[in-house]
Amino acid sequence: METEIINAEHIYICETDIEKIGECIATYIKLCSKGQFDSLDAIFLDIVENLSNFIKASSILKNYLKHTENFNKDSPFILLQFQLLTLLNRLSQAKQRNDLTLIMDILEYELFENLVRWKQDVLNSIKTIK
């Protein structure tokens, strides 16, 4: 029972973080496209903080999943987690170079797609585990 509560809470946290990140990405892209660069650093920081929260909550889910038969080395969880960490590294490098075009591409196409897949391939499948 307690693991089901932890599971449900962390699924909710992950889904909420994905929504927040999606909203921040949309705002970042919109402001960048309009040439309004003043708020970009604050929004970028919001994205990173929400990603950090997402990674923490998803790591707890990973520990939960390790104790079920639904988790193995071929789990989409492993691939998506690796891709997410790679994207964070690339975002950090792009930010250091102040490469707004690359940051926007990573956010809009790669990070957003990764988070959609988290929601579809991982979080929805965890909800079905009893």
Image (cartoon, helix red, strand yellow):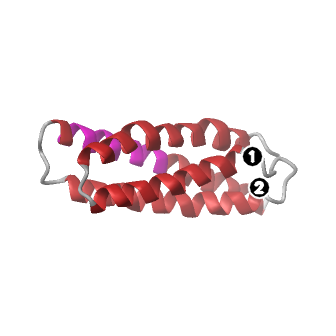
> Is residue 100 within the magenta segment?
no
Of 97 and 58, which appears nearest the observer? 97
Image point 29% across, 62% down: which residue?
96
Label 1: how many Cα within 10 Å (few below 14, some 14–19, many 20+): few
Q: Is residue 22 magenta?
A: yes
- Specify whether 70 is left or right of 96: right
> What residue appears at the point 69 percent right and 55 percent down from the top-left corner?
7
Q: Amino acid at mark 2?
A: Leu
- Write the start and end of the magenta stretch as one range: 17-31
Task: From the image, tell me which residue sits under label 1.
Answer: 75
Q: Residue at x 58, y 60 (%)?
A: 57
Residue reaching furthest right? 69
| Rendering coords of residue 104 (x, y %) | 31, 42
Secondary element type, mark 1: loop
Residue type at mark 1 is Ser
- Please give the residue where the numbered disc 2 appears in the rendered image: 65
Q: Nearer the viewer, mark 2 or mark 1?
A: 1
First in residue order: circle 2 vs circle 1:
2
At x 64%, y 43%, the residue is 123
Magenta span main SS: helix
Work out whether 34 lies above or below 46: above
Q: Position of residue 119 (x, y in %)?
A: 58, 40
In this view of the protein, which residue sits in the foreground, 15 or 31? 31
Contact flag, marks 2 and 1 (Cβ < 8 Å)? yes
Q: Is residue 13 left or right of residue 112?
A: right
